[in-house]
Image (spheres, rainbow, N blue to C red):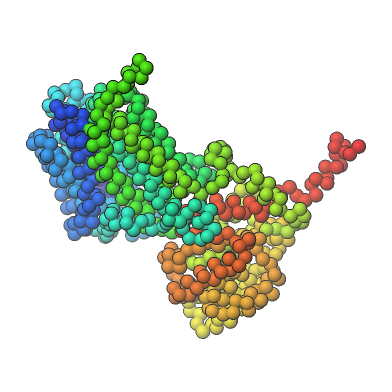
């Protein structure tokens, strides 16, 4: 099957891509083995920086060239060019050519990566689900071989140390990498046709950093922003956290070859550190979305960065190779968890994501990596080696350890600032919050629990609770209403989920007339009355019976939608619409209205189905609707919870759950305490 053969070829080429990094850096270290540690560190750092520089400066150029050449030919050219470059490095045997080859190998990688990412999806049917799986496979073949490449390099280094002399030990890794590219090129050559139906778009990382993430964490609604510590401060905090995590990982890579040499590990130790780091990052990427599920993702991001910084302090101070390898793996776990948590904070699950948040994070990491690879070795060289007399004990401080310690201190400061900016649980103590999350619960301070209990009416009778979800098109009302209902059912409540218009048989007919784009000539007043008629039938046949039996009703839209759409949107008198709906509903008002806010154009872009009659209205209409919802909420703030719908789904759900807890009825039925007097053991004397 062409898909499987191409995937195998791309996996091999991805292996060669990652294997070329330690191969070229080991060659740089070998060519400077007669120099001091500072010169070796700077040579290795220069090679690493040159391998990242094309991705920062020339990414659009690589994407443009890859888009203009046949995909199969581009994959072949990329493998063959990298093969030739890797072979020439040990043959020429000079540091300038090694650096030049590193830059050229990385630039050719810019041609290969977008072509590889577009080739696999082009081999599957033009259907969203197969294409999505193919895109995920393309990401795995590019990033997945990294741990395998590091382990393979460690094995090659062990073989070279046992079989080759000092002058040619580093050559073996370069030749093996070239052989991997040769096999990959042969497999690609055997695949006759690789379609080019999937376009290639590559954006400059510098441009992405300047523009920032598309979904700004925690901006928007007043209540949502206030609760989340959001706005621009949260976005800056997130960027600072990702920068700190990238700085620590890149600082380790920048000095790992020289640091392991000073610890007696050589190339094999270098490979072990790279393997530990990549395996740790992969584990962190897997664990990040799963660990401490009830815990705030923003708090988790800040804590992951702080934990990684503490681990880097241990790595910098301990001079034992085994401990250093394990500490590197742990640092990788924390860094990977920070990365995937940051992506979770930035990504909105309610829409088909365009990859922008991940691209933004990748851009931050790339620029941070170039700076770290250039600066950290310079700091290591400037620090030099020293011997400290600690009360009779001697401690040798080498320059690489000092550079790592400085990076750890900077990361600690950045992590602390990021945590403060990102914290969306102000006033909630961290340790109890963590302890509750470990048990699968959300921590509520005793004073808040007591206040919520005190706010409950003493005699609610059998009346249920009514919760309405409101907002513009594409705000995620249906998703959040469904999640709230699931959460309430999980806690043992009788829940009825409903929606407007169309929750009853009569309502379904009215919905067809109201939303069908073929409905023309309907006056604004007639539209308002039809919505009110649907709502009256909805109250009589769904909402009121459920509340009379004590159920919790969760509705997707209610009266406020008519006030916002037919009042503000159609520019009718809001007071008249309110009077009509008050009569239609018998004056029933929700106990809580959750307003999800999103810019109209952003919400409409989320919609996957063809637009209905209301969705097809002008942007000015939807902007008036948004203004109307905000005006209604500001007029009755005690009933509303305003949230920025561009924030992550899980984060919104947690805030909704916090607010719903305040209005939930006592789970113990009324009158239960009266029955206890019938038990003899507690009968009053």
Q: Is residue 617 left or right of residue 354?
A: right
Q: Residue at x 80, y 45 (%)?
A: 673
Can residue 459 be seen here? The reply is yes
Q: Residue at x 34, y 33 (%)?
A: 405
Can residue 150 be seen here? The reply is no
Query: Toward the viewer: 670 or 418?
Result: 418
Q: Residue at x 59, y 51 (%)?
A: 658
Measuring from the top left, give residue 219's x and y in whole percent. 46, 58
Q: Is residue 34 left or right of residue 574?
A: left
Q: Residue at x 53, y 53 (%)?
A: 227
Q: Is residue 427 left or right of residue 76?
A: right
How many discs mark residues in the rendered view? 0
Q: Is residue 176 above or below residue 73?
A: above
The residue positioned farthest toward the left in the image shown = 92
Measuring from the top left, give residue 456's x and y in whole percent. 71, 53
The residue positioned farthest toward the top in the image shown = 392
Query: Toward the viewer: 128 or 191?
Result: 128
Q: Quadrant of residue 435?
A: top right
Please state, as top left, top right, bottom left or bottom right, where the C terminus lies in the image.
top right
Measuring from the top left, give residue 465's x and y in whole percent. 67, 58
């Amino acid at each position: 099957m062409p898909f499987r053969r191409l995937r195998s070829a791309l996996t091999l080429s991805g292996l060669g891509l990652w294997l070329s990094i330690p191969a070229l850096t080991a060659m740089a270290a070998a060519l400077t083995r007669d120099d001091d540690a500072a010169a070796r560190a700077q040579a290795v750092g220069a090679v690493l920086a040159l391998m990242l520089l094309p991705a920062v400066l020339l990414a659009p150029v690589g994407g443009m060239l890859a888009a203009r050449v046949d995909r199969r030919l581009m994959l072949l050219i990329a493998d063959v060019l990298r093969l030739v470059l890797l072979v020439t490095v040990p043959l020429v045997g000079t540091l300038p050519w090694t650096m030049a080859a590193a830059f050229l190998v990385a630039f050719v990688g810019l041609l290969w990566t977008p072509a590889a990412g577009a080739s696999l999806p082009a081999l599957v049917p033009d259907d969203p689900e197969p294409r999505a799986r193919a895109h995920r496979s393309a990401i795995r073949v590019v990033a997945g071989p990294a741990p395998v490449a590091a382990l393979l390099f460690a094995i090659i280094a062990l073989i070279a140390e046992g079989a080759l002399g000092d002058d040619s030990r580093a050559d073996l890794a370069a030749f093996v990498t070239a052989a991997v590219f040769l096999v990959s090129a042969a497999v690609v050559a055997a695949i006759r046709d690789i379609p080019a139906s999937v376009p290639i778009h590559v954006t400059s990382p510098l441009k992405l950093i300047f523009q920032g993430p598309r979904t700004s964490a925690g901006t928007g609604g007043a209540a949502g922003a206030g609760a989340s510590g959001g706005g621009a401060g949260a976005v800056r905090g997130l960027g600072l956290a990702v920068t700190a995590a990238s700085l620590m990982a890149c600082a380790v890579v920048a000095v790992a070859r020289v640091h392991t040499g000073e610890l007696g590990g050589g190339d094999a130790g270098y490979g072990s550190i790279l393997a530990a780091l990549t395996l740790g990052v992969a584990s962190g990427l897997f664990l990040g979305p799963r660990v401490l599920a009830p815990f705030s993702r923003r708090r988790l991001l800040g804590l992951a960065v702080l934990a990684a910084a503490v681990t880097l302090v241990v790595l910098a101070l301990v001079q034992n190779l085994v401990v250093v390898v394990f500490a590197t793996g742990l640092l990788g776990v924390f860094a990977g968890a920070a990365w995937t948590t940051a992506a979770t904070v930035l990504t909105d699950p309610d829409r088909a994501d365009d990859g922008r948040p991940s691209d933004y994070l990748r851009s931050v990491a790339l620029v941070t990596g170039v700076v770290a690879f250039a600066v950290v070795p310079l700091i290591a060289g400037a620090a030099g080696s020293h011997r400290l007399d600690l009360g009779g004990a001697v401690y040798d401080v080498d320059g690489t350890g000092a550079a790592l310690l400085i990076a750890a201190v900077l990361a600690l400061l950045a992590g602390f600032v990021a945590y403060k900016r990102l914290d969306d649980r102000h006033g909630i103590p961290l340790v109890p919050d963590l302890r509750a999350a470990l048990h699968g619960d959300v921590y509520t301070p005793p004073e808040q629990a007591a206040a919520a209990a005190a706010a409950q009416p003493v005699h609610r009778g059998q009346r249920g609770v009514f919760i309405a979800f409101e907002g513009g098109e594409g705000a995620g009302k249906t998703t959040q209403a469904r999640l709230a209902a699931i959460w309430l059912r999980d806690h043992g409540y009788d829940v009825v989920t409903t929606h407007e218009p169309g929750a009853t048989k009569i309502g379904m007919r009215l919905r067809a007339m109201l939303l069908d784009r073929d409905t023309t000539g309907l006056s604004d007043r007639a539209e308002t009355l039809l919505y009110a008629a649907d709502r009256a039938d909805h109250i009589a046949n769904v909402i009121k019976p459920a509340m009379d039996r004590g159920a919790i009703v969760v509705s997707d839209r209610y009266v406020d939608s008519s006030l916002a759409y037919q009042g503000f949107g159609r520019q009718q008198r809001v007071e008249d619409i309110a009077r009509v709906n008050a009569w239609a509903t018998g004056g029933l008002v929700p106990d809580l209205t959750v307003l999800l806010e999103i810019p109209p154009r952003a919400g409409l872009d989320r919609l996957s189905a063809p637009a209905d009659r209301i969705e097809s209205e002008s942007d000015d209409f939807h902007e008036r609707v948004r203004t109307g919802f905000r005006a209604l909420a500001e007029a009755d703030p005690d009933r509303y919870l305003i949230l920025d719908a561009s924030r992550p789904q899980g984060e919104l759900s947690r805030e909704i759950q916090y607010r719903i807890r305040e209005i939930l009825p006592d789970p113990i039925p009324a009158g239960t305490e009266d029955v206890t007097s019938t038990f003899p053991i507690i009968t009053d004397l």
